[in-house]
Image (cartoon, grey):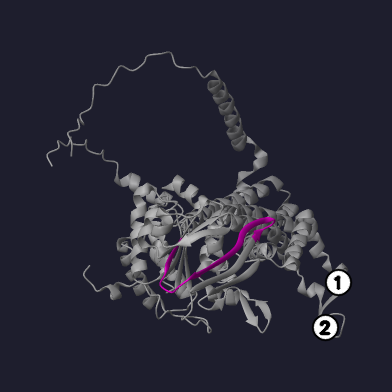
Amino acid sequence: MTDIDTTEPVRPETIKAVPVRHPGRWVSAVIVLVLAAMLVHMLFTNPNLDWSTFGKYFFDGGILKGLVATLELTVIAMAIGIVGGVILALMRLSANPMLSSAAWLYIWFFRGTPVLVQLIFWFNIKALFGDISLGIPFGPMFITWDVNSLVTTFVAAILGLGLNEAAYMSEIVRAGILSVDEGQTEAAQALGMRRLKVMRRIVLPQAMRVIIPPTGNETISMLKTTSLASTVAFTELLKAGEDIFNANYRTIPLLIVVSVWYIIVTSVLSVGQYYLERYFGRGSSRELPPTPLQRLRRNLTTFHVTPPRVPERGTS
Amino acid sequence: MTEPQDSVGFGSGSGSPSGSGSGSGSGPMVRAEGVHKFFGRLHVLRGIDLEVEPGEVMCVIGPSGSGKSTFLRCINHLEKIDSGRLWVDGDLVGYRQRGEKLHEMREREVAAQRRDIGMVFQRFNLFPHMTALENIMEAPVQVRGESKAAVRERAMDLLDRVGLSEKVASYPSQLSGGQQQRVAIARALAMEPKLMLFDEPTSALDPELVGDVLDVMRQLAVDGMTMVVVTHEMGFAREVGDSLVFMDAGAIVEQGRPRDVLTDPQHQRTQDFLSKVL
């Protein structure tokens, strides 16, 4: 090792100059603080907010049942959306022209009409098909069901939200698949892997890194979109709140109850999304970013100051 | 270090684990007859004829765009040839002959054919979501359905032979280019191929990392592997290659023993090319 002088050189004199003033920051700070104070004041003094009602109904049985229904609807609709989205994406990317145009048509239709219209459509499906039968197309039928017994409001909500979601998810999945370098497919094929296996083992796991963040957004968005199901008489969180305030006319407090629940679940989902992204990001960067917990632990254990480096005088 | 040569072998050219039935093993490992390839209206291969004998190391050189990589990719059917015939170990690549008629192979059959042909890419193409070991184990386990335990042992062995036994659990992003390429070679060898294709394996590497990769390839050649190597490493071609092919504008301009072609090129185009790269 050569002789390198590692002692701190004398620090040269720092430039003394008048710093740039930022009057805009002061003005905006004043405006924001005043607005915030007004908001807090309103929260505490406005009698219409009626916090006692809020407290009374926050853990109300009907509200909690509605919350569970909302969660169920979110999970099932997203599951349909993700599975359907993967299938549609594979169809669109397939070499088979029938499959790819069928998928294109599906996406075109389901993205082209509002999800609320689709929900109402499924709710009124009885008006289109009286019965559903299983049999030979254009031939004899073996089993017949009444549509209303099959498509309950829950099923209508799931179909409406899930099938719509599949169209959006398919575009996300497709973008993810296309983001994976073609060399990956070639390398896998050169090893003798077949197309489906290449997709499952090589391409999709890498596409996940691109697919997960927007899917998290879709899930959070779905959580709130389920409130549309209240219009087709399905009792989810919003409808549960509506049922209560239709009886006691305490509209605002109950809307706040519902909103706070939505925010809580959204926050939990965001945390889950962070960990999912971290898991699928492995191998893409040299080191995984620390989880908030790890970061906290590290900060707690390393508050001692690192000792100054002893200058190493080369002798070796 | 002092082990006998045959037991440090990387797999072999002789006694190859010939997967498909009609592979004779006695004829040439690769035979091309009048191979043409078009990309749209671009005529990339203009009638390639050549033979690679078992155990032979053939180096292919030429200016970029001369079609040498394309030809290499035709050998394992990553590219489909438009006319001519191409055989690997006696089997037509990508087609089945029934009487006079040629039938396109199904995807399953093409995949089966590729199992016996290893390929190493310029850009490594390691699977980034898998560790070095998982990269090597992937195909034997997933394609050949071998037991993980047996494959793991072989994979560790291969990593050891490419000098990376301490990198078992590293992800590709944690490896240098040269290390990645050596893992890629080990990955191809894990399928115990009878033929190895190298597509400019050192072109994406920093100069000081090239040597390690070439050393691995040199050892592979010594062990008797049949290799087709598209390369710009004239030193490697001269020293390790049994034959050298110079391609330009989609055709073979000149071929022969590397020493002869490199020191005494017969064609003007070969002379021009060599004067630029040597």
Is residue B47 a member of the stretch shown in magenta?
Answer: yes
What's the amino acid at mark 2? Ile
Query: Which stretch appears magenta?
Result: B38-59
The answer to whether residue B224 is left or right of residue B141 is left
In-front residue for pair B30/A175: B30
The answer to whether residue B155 is left or right of residue B76 is left
In-front residue for pair A194/A35: A194
Q: Can you tell which of label 1 and label 2 is closer to the viewer?
A: 2
Say which mark, if any, is on residue A169. Answer: none
Residue at image location 84% in from the left, 76% down from the top: A131
**Residue B175 can be seen, yes or no:** no
- The percent coordinates of residue B131 (x first, y second) are 41, 62
Q: Kindly identify which residue carries mark 1.
A: A129
State which quadrant residue B38 falls in: bottom right
Q: Secondary structure at mark 2?
A: loop
Marked residue nearer the N-terminal end (1 or 2):
1
Residue B144's place in the image compared with B230, above or below, is below
Q: How many marks?
A: 2
The N terminus of chain B lies in which quarter of the figure? bottom left
**Residue A221 can be seen, yes or no:** yes
Is residue A157 a member of the stretch shown in magenta?
Answer: no
- The percent coordinates of residue B169 (x first, y second) are 36, 62
Q: CA distance from mark 1 to mark 2?
A: 17 Å
Residue B84's place in the image compared with B62, above or below, is below
- The percent coordinates of residue A49 (x first, y second) are 65, 42
In-front residue for pair A244/B260: B260
CB within 8 Å, label 1 to label 2: no
Q: Chain of mark 2?
A: A
Q: Kindly identify which residue carries mark 2.
A: A136
Residue B121's place in the image compared with B53, above or below, is above
What's the amino acid at mark 1? Phe
